[in-house]
């Protein structure tokens, strides 16, 4: 039976959230500081996501060793293709280990390899962009990382058995990225949400559409309240931030609904995406979300919604530059 998330501190390390189910947390949940999870059974373990570099992943695997020493990891599930959820895969890959994800995630993994972040860190993109990229990624080491290809992919839904325990994988992307998935333990009331949930930090819309992400939040709420989830409080492990409850899911959903509605109004008023970013950042409606970490991701998120209205330009350096400009020179009221 799932326990109360309020009893589990938001501290770096491995936390048992239910019998044989663990969350590995990394405060403060900002850029690159992601969470992972573990299901341990007598017949082996399933790992949900690895971390952003090899050092962090080794530290996590060492923390898990008292559990996995006699129940070795036989399956790795990657919730999406961002590096802070898969760049450590090489440390668990090998004979007999399945790396499972959606087909869309598998394609995206090859599109942004660790070498791309090495190049981004070394590029001369202007003072503001360079400073912002260093703030975001300077704590991590992307050199010498090779990300193995997944061994098993799917679309839609995949049901697994690990030591007699049911595990359901559900594709909910494109949303945050092209192929996001949820990991659900139906008999325990536990959902590993990946980056569908940022708790205390601002979601970032690399892909969209927003409607898919809102639907993914709704699906988490459905799974958390499923009849076979047990009588305890649901346990929801986000991709970033502390363990989540129902109110946290609703808060993320609320941000996304506000974002889409505000962008539609701005577009109808004739504002460009860049103008809409500045306007919304200083608006009253944005007030509650300005307290979240990385609020400047609004610069990417507005552009993502505007893509739904028509073609849009913007390279990765452009997007980081826009976030840097917003964070370092916020408009009045922000």
Image (spheres, rainbow, N blue to C red):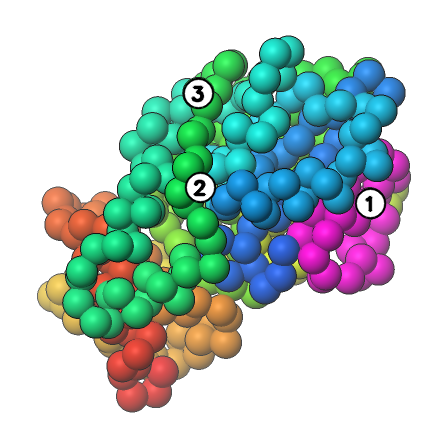
Looking at the image, tell me whether mark 2 or mark 1 is earlier in sequence order. 1
Under circle 3, the secondary element is loop
Q: Residue at x 33, y 47 (%)?
A: 117
The region drawn magenta spans 1-25
Under circle 1, the secondary element is strand
Q: Residue at x 73, y 52 (%)?
A: 13
Residue 96 picture location, percent across and down: 64, 11
The label nearer to you, 1 versus 3, is 3
- C-alpha gap between disc 1 and disc 3: 30 Å
Query: Residue 8 is drawn in which quadrant?
Result: bottom right
Mark number displayed over residue 149: 3
Residue 71 picture location, percent across and down: 81, 24
Residue under label 1, please give it: 16
Relative depth, front residue between 166 and 124: 124
- C-alpha gap between disc 2 and disc 1: 25 Å
In this rendering, position of residue 301 left or right of residue 127:
right
Q: Residues within 10 Å of mark 1 (few under 14, many from 20)?
A: some
């Amino acid at each position: 039976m799932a326990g109360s998330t309020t009893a589990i501190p938001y501290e770096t390390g491995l936390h048992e959230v239910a019998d044989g189910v663990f969350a590995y947390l990394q405060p403060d949940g900002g850029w690159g500081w992601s969470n992972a999870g573990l299901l341990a059974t007598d017949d082996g373990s399933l790992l949900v996501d690895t971390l952003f570099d090899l050092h962090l992943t080794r530290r996590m695997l060492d923390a898990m060793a008292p559990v996995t020493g006699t129940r070795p990891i036989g399956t790795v599930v990657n919730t999406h293709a961002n590096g802070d959820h898969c760049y450590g895969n090489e440390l668990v890959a090998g004979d007999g280990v399945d790396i499972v994800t959606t087909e869309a995630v598998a394609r995206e993994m090859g599109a942004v390899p660790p070498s791309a972040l090495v190049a981004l860190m070394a590029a001369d993109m202007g003072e503001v962009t360079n400073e912002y990229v260093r703030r975001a990624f300077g704590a991590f080491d992307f050199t010498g990382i090779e990300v193995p290809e997944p061994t098993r992919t799917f679309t839609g839904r995949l049901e697994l058995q690990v030591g007699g325990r049911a595990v359901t994988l559900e594709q909910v992307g494109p949303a945050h990225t092209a192929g996001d998935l949820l990991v659900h333990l139906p008999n325990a009331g536990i959902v590993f949400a990946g980056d569908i949930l940022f708790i205390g930090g601002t979601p970032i819309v690399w892909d969209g559409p927003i409607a898919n992400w809102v639907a993914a939040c709704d699906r988490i709420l459905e799974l958390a309240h499923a009849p076979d989830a047990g009588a305890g409080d649901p346990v929801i492990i986000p991709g970033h931030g502390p363990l989540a409850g129902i109110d946290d899911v609703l808060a993320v959903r609320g941000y996304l609904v506000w974002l889409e509605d505000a962008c539609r109004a701005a577009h109808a008023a004739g504002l460009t995406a860049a103008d809409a970013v500045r306007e919304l950042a200083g608006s009253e409606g944005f007030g509650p979300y300005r307290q979240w970490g990385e609020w400047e991701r609004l610069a990417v998120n507005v552009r993502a919604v505007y893509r739904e209205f028509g073609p849009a330009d913007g390279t990765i350096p452009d997007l980081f530059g826009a976030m840097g400009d917003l964070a370092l020179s916020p408009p009045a009221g922000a």
